Image (cartoon, coloured by chain):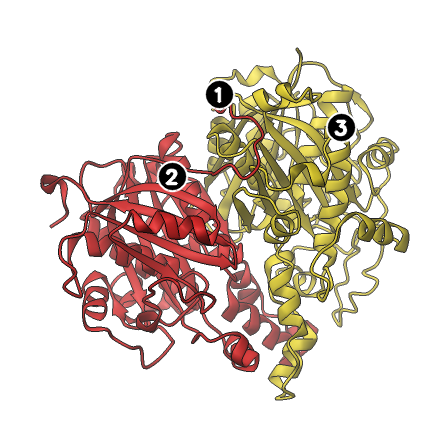
Chain colours: A yellow, B red
Amino acid sequence: MNNIDAVITGMGCLCAAGTDLESVWRSMAAGIGRPNLAVGLEAGIKRLSPVFEVPWTKNLADKLNLNFEGPPTVARTRCVDFFLHALDEALTQAGLTTESLRGKRVGVAVGTTVGCTLNNESFYRDFKNGLNPELDAIHRFLSNNPAPYLSEALHLRGPVSTINNACTSGVDAVGQGMEWINDGLCDIVIAGGTDELSRIPYLGFSSLMNTSESPCKPFDVQRDGLNLGEGAGLLILESKSAALKRGAQILLEVAGYGTSTDAHHPTAPHPQGIGLEAAIRRALGELNPQVIRFINAHGTATPANDKVEGSTFARIFGSNIPVFGTKGYTGHTLGAAGAVEAVFTGQGLITGKIPPTAGFETPDPECLIIPTQAVTDVSGHYALSTSLAFGGNNSALVLKVYHD
Amino acid sequence: MTDKPLEPNAHITVEADIKIRGIGPVLSCGEGVDALKEALAHGFVSETNRVSSKGLEAYVAPKLSRRMDQPTRMAILASYLALNDAGMTVDDAFKNETGIVYGSALGAQGSTFAYLDSIIDGGDHCASSISFTNSVHSIAPSQVALNLGIRGPIRTITAFGYTAGAAMLTASNWIRNKTVKRVLLILCEDSSNVFDYSIAKMGGSCSYICGEGCTAFILERSPGGYCRIGRTEPCLTAAEALERSTACDKLFCASLGESGRFDSYNPVYGSFYNGMGVELAAAALALRHSFENQGSLKKTAAAAVIGPDRITFTELEILKPENIKE
């Protein structure tokens, strides 16, 4: 699909590497990821894995409360707070305000996993023990699904979708937004992903033995698993005509999006990357693969994921294509990951530089690619971001830097 | 491509020449189209709000299904029933040309709580990897893809009351833009003791009885089927929905007890967030088989009340006689 109409006029991001895109990008250029040891997750397991926490402060929360008024009686979740914070940054860059969107054809598409799952442990423990718990946790859950929350809080009149496609959710939300824009359903879509650290998926990934006890090592021969993270990434998508009409500065075009499933295994990718290749080729559409100047890989640092991604990239683009992975700075932010990485891909196109792959030291011959080890200059118009998920989902996004 | 300016309160309308070719209901009132027709015709009131999915044994070996959770079991069975209803076979073309759009308003409740059970009962080190995997909301459609060999795109939407509308938009978009030839649209919801408890404790503020169920649809641009899907409008006000409904012969509405202004078949299936799937099936069946002696219907609509002033609305239109599904 290269029938380009959806453009990007604003981006916002926060993660363990920083609370805005500029600080995140600066931190990644330094090449050092800083996970810590699961503070607050209090897991009673032997195999503890470091995690990447957002440096969320009271100042940031207070600032958010000034800008957004939600339902007064229900506390917001970190998931929603993260998304609103990233929205603030993206709207500012796009030259928009929340008030200017009120009542307009503005869609909201958000990818998340924790943000739409009722896994409140203390409530459930009380329920299970017959303690007749109050319903605060239920009301909080029902009030904090990110996409409905935002659409209702801002009084928007557009379609609403929360996507839970596991680890491709974030990029699929961007794809959903592109579809709505290209279909003429909306003038603007707030599209992205958000997720927060929680004991529940932390224990789940540990039970699957997918986590590493040390900082993760994407594409490294000694990689042994992922580290979880949290954060949000968000894009303001507009139809090109609407953006030009209001005099917005267009940053990027959404040049293509593709998704497919492996139909192979509930939790493991197809070893030959058949589904991933199909997703990439759908995203490329009629574009020659040689126009892609760099790739932001999903790069979870699990043995299976990185091998499949690397070998698929080499098959389509050749082994010398510049590839970078960012989980060594952000951790795996699950439902947010695809959107956070779409922002990084866009920023790479805009700045002409991509960061080193934190955690990578020694190439793995089976990966067939060597990711960036230093800040790398990149030129050209197009870049690719990929995501893979539980259940065999694969999604790919092609962005193009905008020129008048 | 759009050229519309930024206008306040502009409506969002999707029109697509897409037909419903097959329907697969798996509900407390029974499995398959005939069971639903029977229930609708005779005003069946469910004695249980749980679904057995007993028909799954005809399609999936017990040794494979025993680790599946309730939404997965319902979704797979509903998919096979919809395929059978459409008279379709699963060949390579089907596998490559089909996408899955799966809507579950609240996600996999049963597995989420089963996973929490494993932690609370056995300690952190006993967290169940199987329940954790099943608690990922997209596992049910992934298992459908695994069972049918579908290699097209999958999208899982978990947006509470907005789910059915967003799923309809996605399915229409994929077919209209030729992302895939057809979509297996699955609207599914499992129940749980936690939500039964919550609804009971909410008392007067929430009057509906929790149910569960799944309805699958085969959607494509085929000439024949049950009906043509007209416009979908994902975000109407109540006044706008009432106005739209006057142009229809009958409106089928999943209301969750929040609005008494629209008819609903909630008693047939027990209310749940994704009840619009059942109402959509009822609206399609009504165009083909007039139940309740309503006479011949030409246009029906299915709707879901999301909030006090937010309603998703989909119109269905009768086909030419030669294209109506027998």
Residue that carries the numbered disc 3 in the rendered image: A372
Q: On the picture, is B154 further left or further right than A107?
A: left
Three-letter residue code for mark 1:
Asn
Q: Label 1, label 3: how many angstroms apart (C-alpha)?
A: 31 Å
**What residue do we see at 52% from left, 81% from top?**
B200
**Residue A122 is drawn in which quadrant?**
bottom right
Q: Mark 2: few, some, or many residues within 10 Å (few <14, many ≥20)?
A: many
Q: On the picture, is B257 further left or further right than A316?
A: left
Three-letter residue code for mark 3:
Thr
Look at the picture and state if A290 lies above or below B136.
above
Q: Mark 1: few, some, or many residues within 10 Å (few <14, many ≥20)?
A: few
**What residue do we see at 63% from left, 49% from top?**
A335
Residue that carries the numbered disc 1 in the rendered image: A3
**Residue B224 is drawn in which quadrant?**
top left
The quadrant of the image that shows the C terminus of chain A is top right
- Res. B72 in view: yes
Circles 3 and 2 on the same subunit: no
Q: On the picture, is B149 further left or further right than A102?
A: left
Q: On the picture, is A267 further left or further right than B92?
A: right
Residue that carries the numbered disc 2 in the rendered image: B172
Report in which chain the residue with disc 3 lies: A
